[in-house]
Structures are given as C-alpha cells and as structure tokens.
Amino acid sequence: MRNKYGLLIIILIFLLAGLGLNILNKFYTVGYIYDLLFKREFAVNPRVEIDPEKKYTVRIWYYPIYRTTKMAQGEKSYFQEIARGIQEKYPNIQLKIRELNFLDGHQELLESIKKGEPPDIYWNISGDSLLDQELQLPVDPYITEQQEGFFTVNWEEINRDNHLWALPFLIQEQYWVINEDDNVFQASSGFIKSISALDTARLALNTADETLLRQLLTLKGLKEISLEGGDVDEDTYKTLKEVYEIMHSMREKGVFVSSSKNIDDDFLKNFFSKKPVLIGPVNPYLACFLSENTNGHRVMLDNLIKEYSLTILRQKDYQGHDHSKAVMLTALHMVTSGTEMITEILPLKAAYQRDSAEKREYVKLLEISPEDREYWRGVILPAWQDFWQNDLLPVEVMDKIK
C-alpha cells in the first residue's frame, strides 16, 4: 500500500512539474531563464507583450537608397507605408526615421554605440556583422513562427552563442555584367574557372570595392577569415594566395581593359566600347545605371548573394522587454511588408519569402567578423590595393599578409 501511494505521489509530482513548466513557458522562454539564472548575462524575454496604454518610439537609422528621382520617391513612399502599417497594427508605436550620409554615417553609428545610445533599428548595408554584441539583441527568439521564410539562414549553423544577431532584410544576387552576347562568356563550369579562361573578352574590375575580393574568396570556398597568433590561418592564407595567382595570371594574359594603375579611371569608359567587356563587381546603384544605359547581360556568380540586414540595438540604459518587443514588431513589419517597393526600384530580392517554391540554395558573401575586422582593413585590404596599384607578384603581396 505504501509503495502504491509512493508511486502516485511521484506521478503527481511529475504532473505538477509539467503543469508548472507549461504555465511558465507561457510567460518566459527557456533561453531567457537559462541566460538570466545560470549564465547570469543580460537576457531578453520575447514573451513580454507591448503595453497598449504606453507610447513607444522606435528610432530607425538608414543610408539612402536613392540615386535618382524615381528612387527618392520610392524610398519616401516605402517609409510612409511602413509607418502607416505600424500605426494600423500598433497605434501606440511611433517611428522616428533618420537618414545617414555615406561619408560619416557609419562613424556616427559607431560613436552612438560607444555612448550606449544607438538607434533601435539600423538598416545595415555596410557589410559589418555583429557591430557590438553587448548592445545588440538577438532576433531568433522573436521569429520562431517566421523562421522558414528566412531562406538565407542556415539554422543549423547559427554561431555566436547560438543566436542570429541581425534580421535578414534584402538580398542582392551577385553578378557581373558583360556588354556582349552570352556566348562570349560561359560560366557553366563555375565562375572562377570561366574568368580564368578568358582571352577574347576584357575585364574591367572596380578593385577599390572590397566586395570584389570578398566575392573571389567566397567563390574559392573560404567561409570566414580566421586568425592564429595575429596572422591569418592556413586556410585563409592558402585561399588568398590562390586568388592572387588567378588575378596575376589574368594580368599576364592582358585581359584587363587597361594598366592596373588606371582601372578605376577606365572602369565604365571601356564598357561602352565596341569590344566585349566584363565588368564587376556590380552593386545595386551601378546595376540601375547600367540597366538604363546599356543592354548588358548578367553573369551570375554561382548562386552567391550579399545580404542586407536589420540590426536591432539596445541602449545602455535598457528600456525594457516591452520596448524591445515594439522594436522587433517594427523590424518584422519592415521585412515582411512593403519590400516590393524597394525591389521595384533596386535589383534586390526580399530575404523573407512566404512562397517556399521560390527558394533556392544560396551561398552568402564572405562576412568579416568584428574580431577580424581590424586585420582585414589594416592588412588584407591594403595588400590588395598594393597588388593592383604597384603590379606586385603574388609572392610579394603574400609577404605583406604573413
């Protein structure tokens, strides 16, 4: 009889524990409890709802997407539509939108982060990832229902404390443009092999755009820049060396449109000549210019994409989980609604797609992590520029790297 009651008591304890966890889960996530109680770190509770009686101001900083009157009108309409949609869903959320300039906007953002007073949402087109983890909010706890729609995210490979630190917003398929028929350039064997085999077509490369180097490194299979003992690791060194050897062999064949010292000067001029010219990399603004002025053909880069994201930042004096929820609701609305206004004026695609039939297997352009950013900008990029400006040999430029 005692054993029977003991068994019933154990079963009752398990039932009560399960009921308690179920109730607790309605108000808190496991991740929040674990980070708060066991890791003793700042944690955000995504289950907190916004207070309908409270006013929330969400500050959005962004770089202008316009380069023409049409773009400016489209950008203005986009933010008006976003503000209208937010007001309809959440009347107590107000948006404060600020345009940064390309000259000193990024530095202004970094200074605001350093002061602990950053914007709530930063439309990141700088290529920087994880600006400051101490003042960022992970987005994955808020988007459990939408995860399948973010087709550029490999949820099995999320790193940095197993969180996604930016909300995928827009993607640009990476391609170069050629001003001749497609039979001049065949990329069926892969982009790197195809440009290595060029002889009749000519190359016009914007070597000042670091996207070019990141494209080539990614296409050669490099997933991240890694440092060991203050220098790049073996894989990074090997891939960099391969890229320089490919570029040097092409330079020796004379497929570039001009001397490497004058490539920037002749960048577009040669594209409009009668000879076939392959031009790259192509950013959204150059793509718009070329589409309006030439009938050039796209040469896709092996399903390679560049992702533009929304970084969610928190202020040093934290404003509460309900404010974070208001910010995230705004960011999700930006991502899931109204993006067609941008994609109509810029050659971009929405990173969030409800229709799974449109999804493809994409490769993301190499990202430079904060811990490697100083080495990338202080060592790798100067060596890249030196290679072009002074016609260095691969062995000479690699001596500058390691």
Image (spheres, rainbow, N blue to C red):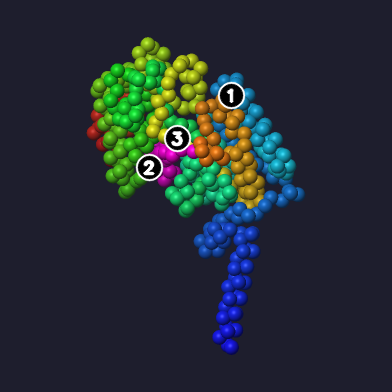
**Highlighted range, magenta:** 359-381
Q: Which amino acid is tagged 2?
A: Lys
Q: Residue 147 placed where, x, y %?
A: 54, 47
The residue at 55%/63% (across/down) is 37
Name above or below for residue 164 compared with residue 6.
above
**Distance of label 1 from label 2 (alpha carbons):** 34 Å
Disc 2 marks which residue? 223
Residues 128 and 18: in front is: 18
- Does label 1 or label 2 sit earlier along the sequence? 1
Q: Residue at x 72, y 39 (%)?
A: 88
- Mark 3 element type: strand
Q: Secondary structure at mark 2?
A: loop
Please identify the quarter of the rendering in which residue 109 is found: top right
Task: Work out whether 46 lies above or below 265.
Answer: below
Q: Residue at x 58, y 24 (%)?
A: 71
Q: Which mark is residue 305?
A: 3
Is residue 365 rendered magenta in the image? yes
Q: Are marks 1 and 2 in contact (CB under 8 Å)?
A: no
Q: Mark 1 = which residue? A: 71
**Residue type of the residue flagged with mark 1:** Met
Judging depth in this view, the residue of 20 and 163 nearest the camera is 20
Question: Comparing marks 3 and 1, which lies closer to the viewer?
Answer: 3
Relative to 261, residue 104 above or below? below
Q: Quadrant of the C terminus?
A: top left
